[in-house]
Amino acid sequence: MIEHIKIKTALISVSDKSGLKELAEALAASGVELYSTGGTEKFLRDNGFAVKSISDLTHFPEMMDGRVKTLHPMVHGGLLFRRDVAEHTAQAKEHNIRPIDLLVVNLYPFEATVAKTGSTHEEIIENIDIGGPAMLRSAGKNYEAVALLTSPAQYPEFIQELKKNSGSVSHATRLALAGEAFEHVAVYDRAIADYFEGKKKITLRYGENPHQKASVSSAFLDSLYEQLWGKELSYNNYLDCSASLLVISEFLDSSKAVVGIIKHTNPCGMAEGKDVLDAFEKAFATDTESPFGGIIVMNRPCNEALAMRVNEFFSEVILAPSFDENALTLLKKKKDRRLLKFDPAMLRKRTQSGTDIRSIVGGILEQESDNQLFTNAEMKSVTKRPVSEEEREGLLFTWKICKHVKSNAIVYAQTENGFARTIGIGCGQTSRVASSRLAVTSAKRFGHSLSGSLVASDAFFPFADGLIEAADAGAIAVIEPGGSVRDEEVIKAAEERNISLVMTGMRHFKH
């Protein structure tokens, strides 16, 4: 390992000239010999810096409109040869290959060109950088002997280190900069691949809050649904639409109409019905305050009767597999409402497999999508009280909803004439009992009787108190994963209260 390397020669080729003057001043003050290309060379000369052309290094002219200038052994040999290997050093000397100690490159603005209104396909293609990524990979591979910069944001700290160490750069800094360079190239290549696959990146007005910038891949729109009406979707709309599609995907094959109302990615009411209007009325009744400004999603076509009902209040988005012509005409009367027609077949395909990716501070978490579910055939009570067929269907409905509620999640539901509906939902609380109390309080507030209710919990009850809370509220059947060291206490509490208790052996945390 080479602890410090002295920067003697630098190759600079950047599309973004921000901070370049300050960096060049620091390099010149340290006696670094500068080589550059095209517009970067002109910028440096115009600002009074002594700089040599890339052609002085390669002894070959830039050609083909700049497409070929750095793809040359004099460049890549200078970046790649190992200074600690005698054979490499001898070959470099034999072929007059000069070592390049510092590479400063940021790539052609491909993503900005794609996002710019009016950009032609030819312009976009010309903004695919070839030499830049190649040089970054060479320098990154040989970070033991080469430092590399890919962003103006890195310059101030680099300049500070250069001054502190008399023109030298540490091994730790070179390693960190190499990692950032490979990440930079990976993101760049992904953007190019997305473009060729038709996944144009859309810049949104702002993110979760107005001070945050945001964008989305249009593949989400193109493959899953078509926007029939309304202004562009916001960042929060995309999140809520995704949550809505995920929960309705559980009911694509249902023989009953199912309607859900989603707010802040949580279901605030869902129900089965003889038609979409009947299902909507039951879902809306769960909580008659939260639906305003939310998302309405259904597994059947939106008809005129439902359109007339939902037209009575504001909803951000309505998602349906299709819209009757009269429904569409009526719903289009409100310009701020978005109407999206989703493709059930594509949704089914997307949710049968896949990967969830989330960012965390300093890294990325990746997992398989939670696309498994406990089935009716597996359902068996671990207490003496059996589960009736209607209760089976109702518990399965409640379990499906609970899977899409933020943890800790508790869902209360009822069945009537073969149709299930939510009556109380407790989400996102730091204790399971608190979620249960929230669901009970909400149900009572909106006039629902909890007598004979069904309850689903996304994870096991760590103590019997959660089940006792449900029993005291009037529940007659509970579905939960089981697996607690106190399962026997929970089962005993259920037996004493004559409650059916189904343990699925499958948890559905949603953080």
Image (cartoon, helix red, strand yellow):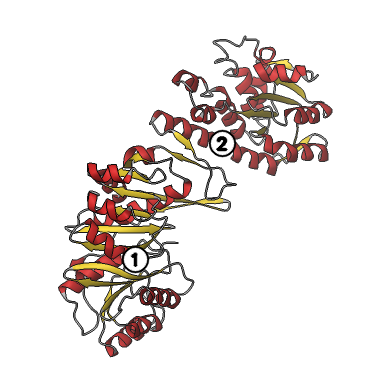
| Residue 345 image offset from top left, x and y in percent | 24, 44
Secondary structure at numbered mark 1: helix
Quarter where residue 499 is shown? bottom left
| Residue 321 image offset from top left, x and y in percent | 25, 46
Check disc 2: other Cα within 10 Å, few if <14, some if 14-19, many if 20+: some
Frontmost residue, 216 versus 291:
291
Label 1, on which residue?
Answer: 402
Secondary structure at numbered mark 2: helix
Quarter where residue 461 is shown? bottom left
Which residue is painted at 20% across and 72% down in the image?
416
Residue type, mark 1 in image: Cys
Frontmost residue, 144 versus 11:
11
Q: Is residue 145 left or right of residue 471?
A: right
Check disc 1: other Cα within 10 Å, few if <14, some if 14-19, many if 20+: many
Quarter where residue 405 is shown? bottom left
Q: Nearer the viewer, mark 1 or mark 2?
A: 1
Question: Compared with residue 375, is residue 82 higher up or lower down, i.e. above or below?
Answer: above
Q: Is residue 387 left or right of residue 459?
A: left
| Residue 401 image offset from top left, x and y in percent | 32, 63
Label 2, on which residue?
Answer: 184
Residue 247's disc number: none
Question: Compared with residue 238, is residue 442 higher up or lower down, i.e. above or below?
Answer: below
Q: Is residue 168 left or right of residue 231?
A: right
Residue type, mark 2 in image: His
Q: Is residue 4 visible?
A: no
Which residue is painted at 60% across and 40% down in the image?
180
| Residue 327 image offset from top left, x and y in percent | 26, 46
Q: Is residue 483 visible?
A: yes
Question: Quick one: quadrant of the N terminus?
Answer: top right
Which residue is painted at 47% across and 74% down in the image?
431
Frontmost residue, 262 versus 33:
262
